[in-house]
Amino acid sequence: MKFKVKNLAKIKKAEFDIKDLTIFVGKNSTNKTYAAHTVYMLNKLLPQEEKFDFFNEKPTNLFTNFYKKKGKDLIKILEKATKNEKLKEIKNSSLISKEQIIRMVTLTIDNSELKKIVNSINKYILEYILKQINNSFNSEKNTILEFIDINFTPKINTISITNNKKEQDNLLFLKEIFIQVYNSYEQLKINNKEYYFPASRTGFVLAFDEIVSGVLRDRFGGQPTATKLTEPTIDFISNFSSIKSGNFYDNFEDLFENNSKKSKTINQLLEFIEKRVIKGKILEEKSSHNYTKIFLEANSKKLDLHLSSSAAVEVLPLIIFLKHFSTLKDKLLVIEEPEAHLHPQAQIEMARLLIMLVNAGAKVLITTHSDYILNEISNCIKLAEADSKGVENYLNAYGLNKDIIINKERVSAYLFKDTDDSVEVKELGIDKYGIFNDNFDDVLDELLDRTEEINKYIDLKSN
């Protein structure tokens, strides 16, 4: 999915190409979270094939509001577009109703009048998306993002309507065009389900019950919580709450059978995290009212979360969600600061895990400050370009499998950099030698320079 934004917080303008693995890297306060939030909400707002939602009325409701604003003017344009088109009328007998007339007309995007209609619908849909994204920030100013545009041209197929009142033809044609344009955005969706893992996950996990009660009080008119949360964070809390209360279903079948079957790959991912990242095992135990309590098992001891390592608690939400996913093939995972509370060696393992998630079918977007994660992802890109025998030796030496290898075409990376009064977003080059990035070099150079300077002072005193 490609899109561009203008005036997103301090970001004056930026263009993004969201791939299987997308990396937002940069210093603190460079608006990486705002960009990740926007990707999450954009994917959430795009339509999807509703296989089981028989009550989805969003396209119709959107059209009603659209028609109030633009409908009458566009009907006149549509009359011009269909004036020279021959309508095919097919009489159809029905046992349920009286004789119906099916009218069909083929309209192409080359029709200049139709282009005006499609452009107007496109503009309205983007305005709707922009408004909803701004609402999702839960900001009093409500203008965090000023402009968004998606690199996309919808296609219109043959339009047919069923109607026995000829005077309503153009209204029904307009509605059908609107629904086709709206539904065509489905092909832009990164994956059908999106999950957000906010920064400061340790705080959310340890204070979870109080946070949830505050959000619920706020929503249902009780004593509100003083803390404002964004929509992606509220989604995270809601999903985590559903898991703990036994009401989380990964697919339609689980709703009836309640026996979600994890793929073999997910079990392998869980084993990788527990053995190589947190050095322990996350346990779930049902208590009263089907509520789940979570513990860490380490060195044959079962620990409450407040007594567990910060690394385990920080990674815990991802582990818990994986335990309740039956597949990763329909999921977008947006993970803020996956390196948080992790030792550099564990950060390297986390980088490998991110690629394993992608190779298991997920789309993954991360925000990071970690040179270790960025460099290890570069190494995994390089492995896709390396000699096969050398790669085999490398993987065996480090106890790894080919699922940590990723092709460079599947990765995009962006550097968020402070300027005088704004943030510049620069796409980082990626080739067979990995990701081009000097984001951390200047900091390291400065540290080494200061170290050398202090060493000189020590030598002066000694002399």
Image (cartoon, helix red, strand yellow):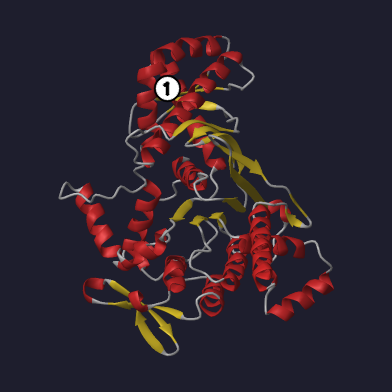
In the image: residue 230, left or right of residue 417: left
Q: Which residue is mark 1?
A: 172
Task: Using the image, determine if residue 287 lies above or below residue 213.
Answer: below
Label 1: state its secondary structure: helix
Q: Is residue 164 visible?
A: no
In the image: residue 185, left or right of residue 316: right
In the image: residue 84, left or right of residue 146: right
* Name of the residue lying farthest toward the left: 222
Q: Which sits in the foreground, 317 or 332?
A: 317
**How many numbered discs sit on the rendered protein?**
1
Residue 183 pos. (x, y %): 49, 36
Q: Is residue 293 visible?
A: yes
**For the residue marked with disc 1, what is the amino acid?**
Leu
Name the residue located 37 percent from the left edge and 47 percent from the top edge: 231
Identify the image quadrant of the N terminus: top right
Name the residue located 54 percent from the left edge and 80 percent from the top edge: 275
* Name of the residue lying farthest toward the bottom: 300
Q: Which sits in the foreground, 449 or 274?
A: 449
Which of the 4 image quarters holds residue 329? Answer: bottom right
Q: Which sits in the foreground, 456 or 374?
A: 456
In the image: residue 283, left or right of residue 379: left
Task: Using the image, determine if residue 326 lies above or below residue 159.
Answer: below
Specify few, some or many for label 1: CA neighbours under 10 Å numbering under 14, 14-19, or 20 or more: some
Residue 403 pos. (x, y %): 66, 68
Residue 110 pos. (x, y %): 64, 19
Identify the image quadrant of the C terminus: bottom right
Name the residue located 51 percent from the left edge and 50 percent from the top edge: 28
Name the residue located 33 percent from the left edge and 49 percent from the top edge: 229
Task: Using the image, determine if residue 449 lies above or below residue 429.
Answer: below
Residue 418 pos. (x, y %): 57, 41
